[in-house]
Image (cartoon, helix red, strand yellow):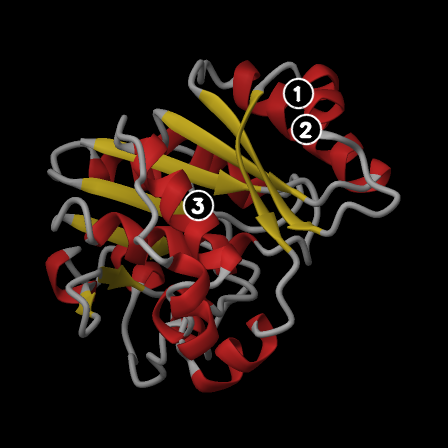
Amino acid sequence: NRVIGVVSGKGGVGKTTFVANVGLSLVEINNDVTVIDADISTSNLGMHLNLYQFPLGLQNVLDGDLDIFNATYMHPTGLKVIPTPLYIQNPRKSYSPNALKNLLENEAGIFIIDSPPGLNRNVDLVLKASNEVIVITTPDIASVTDAMKTVKLARDNGIKNINIAVNRVSGKYELTREEIESACDAEVIGEIPEDKAMKACLMYGTPIVLAKPYSKSSIAFRTIAAKIMGKEYQPPRFLFIKRLFG
């Protein structure tokens, strides 16, 4: 299996948005994709995918009360989702670093894990389970500095396949792709442009790749998904015209 941990050095950089949209984009290429909300204390991946009614989820599996199959919910697109319930009894509970790894090691498919933000203890849960990591950052100095620390932490955990995804790119007063790669000593797998439609997408629980499939940000997410699968994404023909009407 492939287990890709999506991590960030700080909150608010669009990590969960990335997981939802890249997960949906991967389903268009490979039908066995599962996204996991491992942000136990502040979970919201389900809200991004319009999934609110799930009394059981990842924490119940980690507690040994449920198997992973019965904690998996199916999105209408075919994307599989293992959420963490919005209301849990012990949001600050920590687990053995190998707990998630032990759950996934015999499971087939592609798993994308939404990690807690920052460098708190439960991030180790994700890093130990992952054989690949994508670090999410925005192109400002503070966020990239945190990304550098996160890349180092991933390397300290023995992960060699590490990429950077740069979110909310606008081109003004920002670090360039080359500067970010040099600072983090890791390749930038893609840049997602700033998109004001993202807030509405969260409000309605419809990720941008579904709500506005021809937008620049949707094309960026699909391009990243293709790179993850070792493919080259070919944007739709007459893209400019489709954006006008879609």
In the rendered structure, the answer to whether residue 157 lies left or right of residue 138 reads left
Instruction: Decide which of tag 3 and tag 1 comes sooner along the chain.
Output: 3
- The amino acid marked with disc number 3 is Tyr
Q: Residue at x 65, y 71 (%)?
A: 196
**Disc number placed over residue 65 in the picture, else none:** none
230 up-or-down from 120: above or below: above
Label disc, if present, on residue 177 of the rendered structure: 2
Q: Is residue 88 visible?
A: no
Amino acid carrying label 1: it is Glu
Crowdedness near tag 1: few (<14), some (14–19) or many (≥20) residues, C-alpha within 10 Å: some
Residue ID at (51%, 56%): 216
Mark 2 residue element: helix
Residue type, numbered disc 2: Arg
Q: Which residue is mark 3?
A: 95
The answer to whether marks 1 and 2 mark residues whose Cβ atoms lie closer than 8 Å is yes
Looking at the image, residue 144 lies above or below residue 56: above
Q: Report the Cα–Cα distance between label 1 and label 2.
A: 6 Å
Residue beneath disc 1: 181
Q: Is residue 201 above or below residue 101?
A: below
Between marks 3 and 2 in the image, the one whose residue lies nearer the viewer: 2
In contact (CB < 8 Å): disc 3 and disc 2? no
Of the residues under marks 3 and 2, which one precedes in the sequence?
A: 3
How many marks on residues?
A: 3
Residue 175 vs residue 242, the one in the foreground: 242
Cα distance in 3D space between marks 3 and 1: 33 Å
Q: Which residue is located at x 81 percent, y 41 percent?
A: 140
Residue 84 in percent (x, y) is at 38, 66
Residue at position x 62%, y 52% in the image: 193
- Mark 3 and mark 1 residues within 8 Å of each other at the beta carbon: no
Mark 3 and mark 2: span between their CA atoms?
Answer: 36 Å
Does residue 154 appear left or right of residue 72 in this picture?
A: right
